[in-house]
Amino acid sequence: MERKEPNSFQALGLRPWLAKQLTKVGLKDATPIQKSCIPAILSGQDCIGAAKTGSGKTFAFALPILEKLSEEPVSHFALVLTPTHELAYQISEQFLVAGQPMGVRVCVVSGGTDQMIESQKLMQRPHIVVAMPGRLADHLTGCDTFSFDNLKYLVVDEADRMLNGDFDASLAIIEKSLPKARQNLFFSATMKDFIKDSSIFPIANECFEWSEESQVATVDTLDQRYLLCADYDRDMVLIEALRKYRDENPNSNVMIFTNTKKYCQLLSMTLQNLDIENVCLHGFMRQKERVAAISRFKSNHIRTLIATDVAARGLDIPSVQLVINHMLPRTPKEYIHRVGRTARAGRSGMSISIFRFPRDLELLGSIEDEINTKLQEHPIDQRMVERIFMQVNVTRRESEMKLDNNDFDERAQNYRRKTWIIEGKDPDQMEALYRKKQKDKLKEIRRKRKEQQEKSLGSDEKQALMQDERFQTMDKERFEKRPKRKSETANLKHPNAIKKTKTKPS
């Protein structure tokens, strides 16, 4: 008779019911961060854990918390702080799935919904509270209908972003409401010195620290590629890359990242008008709209998601096979978070980043230095890019006019004013300050752009990359400023220039 292999989660000190539940949801083997951090947390140590995206960080803290909660099922047992709405809901789902046999109660406090409804949920004695710091601070200063006196665990997820100073005012309010005797658990994709040195949430000197030992910041199963474009044809290059990938992978799920809320909405409308079905996700959407967009994408009803960086951290959608950086992230760290939405938990995936040539070569070099990997060129048909140029350009102009008619800027202003009012600030004064900052920012962008134009290809890093064998044989003339040609309007007479890419639900 064969001996049954011991469950790897039971071997870490978790109860059989919890290990059995994990097997039911398809988790059979613990990941390295789980193997290292779960026993340390169960032993009562504070913990700092850092590992690549998709390595199972959420269960590394959720499982030992559920284990201890089953021994002492009290309300407000653990508080998890996280920077985005989407991540808050995802973490709550993982707690609910793993803790389903014990009937765990989880409350999400993230804004975007009526504050009174959230207050009522906090009063209903949830075991776990998953919160964004700003909204939780509002509850703590505005009412006294719940308490964290029973709190045993404070978890700061995406700690590199949460503790970098941007959230300090809200975190300071939260800290005053928490008991000093608790376990602090900080988790992140990257290890930063300031995480351990946080003055707001001090962590024990003898805390357990675990960081993934790897010189490569992205997973081996991720195929990382680049595409070069000129200043004028980024959208056309994106659409042709998407069309080509869809032809080869008709049932694939694709995430497209861009940098601003307005451009996210504009790109979504443009693609929709070109019969490329998609949903978008950005910060100006109402919470119910954001939840609906994620649900339609997760359920494979819609196969393309266009998002800002609100979707770059922690979001776990196993079906994502391709990530496209339509606009490049501002830092290599954000690149790592974005491409980490695919090739998760041992699966394979691809990322394609669109670089303007030669303007973005320095950023390409910075990204490759950070991930210790060279990106490979992704082949597309340049003739097709030229063929669809006018059609895409006109469609985008139409979308821009429609977006203006939808008063996107006015909605953005109303969103800002509402936030300032909640924070107790004078909205008129803050709006004037905001406009001045935007004006100064625009001047600074123009100044830097002028400096870059004057330096042209003067930087050593860019010069070195220009000598890279990847760019030696390319036709550099096609990246120069494109003259307008009346003959291009003929393409508009051919509506099938862009292949229809609607996909039926699988």
Image: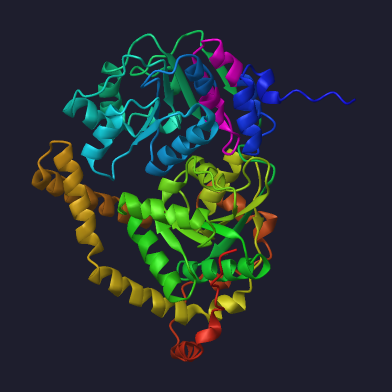
x and y percentages locating residue 502 in the rendered image: 53, 72
Viewer-closest of 387 and 447: 387
What residue is rendered at 68% in x and 67% in y? 248
Residue that lies at the very extreme toward the right in this rendered image:
1
x and y percentages locating residue 409 in the rendered image: 23, 60
Work out whether residue 263 can be spotted: yes
Q: How is the image coloured?
A: rainbow
Work out whether residue 356 can be spotted: no
x and y percentages locating residue 191 in the rendered image: 52, 27
Q: For residue 173, which quarter of the picture?
A: top left
Q: For residue 477, which quarter of the picture?
A: bottom right
Question: Residues in magenta?
Answer: 37-63
Viewer-closest of 434 and 35: 35
What residue is rendered at 41% in x and 71% in y? 270
Residue 89 versus residue 300 in the image, above or below: above
x and y percentages locating residue 439 in the rendered image: 21, 53
Residue 47 versus residue 157 in the image, above or below: above
Residue 120 versus residue 211 in the image, above or below: below
